[in-house]
Image (cartoon, helix red, strand yellow):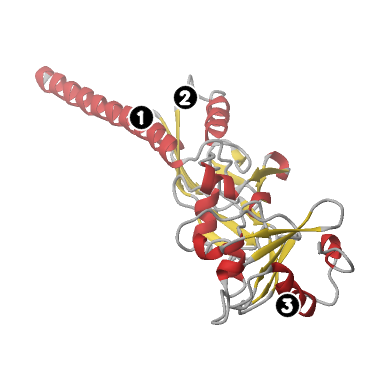
Amino acid sequence: MYLCFRLLCFALAVILGIQAQNAEALLAQAKAAEQQTAPPEYQLQPGDELQIQVLDIPELAAQVKVRPDGKVSLVLLNEVQAAGKTVAELRTFLSDAYAKYYRTPRVGLIVKNFDNRTVYVTGEVVHPGAIPLSAAMTAVQAIVKAGGLSDKSKAEDAVVIRQLDRNVPRTIHLRVSDVLQSGEPDLKLQPGDVIYVPKSDIKVFVGGEVNKPGMIPVDSRLTAMAAVMFAGGFTNTASPKNAFLMRDNGEHKATIIKLSLDEVMKGGADTLLKPYDVVFIPKSGIARADRAMDQYVRSLLPVVLTGGFSYIFGNAFPK
């Protein structure tokens, strides 16, 4: 009988030891999963699904979803505010709260599912709307998933709007053109971020032998050839080698700059445009700028131009 009792005690000890090892492993797994699944500084939101384990206290285990009021119901603690806390903050809170009932409780917390793992891309993008947030997604990647920038976007003034504690928004400036062209660091997104790309309110004018002459929004990277492409490209009667640029010289007078877009199409250097530049493509056979102006500029420019375009009229052109 005594031998049986000792064997029973030994078996219980083994079982309890295995359970303790499993509990330790579960706690370690929970902490590892917490680090992998929760984005840095991510604040819990309504709809997030949480799994809670307390070492050696299985009756406190729970899998709960954060309610619309931001709270969860837990054994002994009743209503606990979860939304607005980070994973680490909630784990610390639960450890302190359970310490009133148990000695040094060790709490493991895993976010099983992020209900609000989306970001929103709006403004001047091709397909504005909600974008599912994948791991390590950046702002420019989200813009690409939204179809990219529209031809009216002002990429250097994009912003990311992020909700902080107490729903206080923070605005983060994002120069998309610098990220794409200069290798500047991109911004890692968090659930609920809103990326807004504004519309350019500064334009250049493209006229002459292009398919869609008119105003083109300009940003810091718009070139003469790109502006021609936005204007529908050259017509069959265009003379790209005789293209020219009219630019305000600061005294409401126009400076004429030869563009030679035929060389640009062969890989030559393009010209960066400035606000209120006027790009003109004359017909084939017209080589001199003054003849092009006489025959095209005055007849094709809009009747009313605002802002910096006013220098075009009157005696603005050099003779």
| Residue ID for mark 1 | 28
Three-letter amino acid code at the position of disc 3? Tyr
Q: Residue at x 88, y 66 (%)?
A: 315
Q: Residue 19 at x, y = what percent?
A: 28, 30
Q: Please name whichever residue, 47 or 147, is drawn nearer the observer in this view of the structure.
A: 147
- Mark 2 Cα within 10 Å, few/some/many (few <14, many 20+)? some
At 85% from the left edge and 66% from the top edge, which residue is drawn? 306
- How far apart are labels 3 and 2 at the CA level? 83 Å
User: Which residue is identified by label 3?
Assistant: 296
Dot 1 or dot 3: first in sequence order is 1
Going from N to C along the chain, the mark reached first, 3 or 2, is: 2
Q: Secondary structure at mark 2?
A: loop
Disc 3, SS: helix
60 to 312, vertically: above or below: above
What amino acid does circle 2 point to? Pro
The residue at the point 27 percent across, 27 percent down is 21
Q: Farthest bottom residue? A: 236
Disc 1 secondary structure class? helix
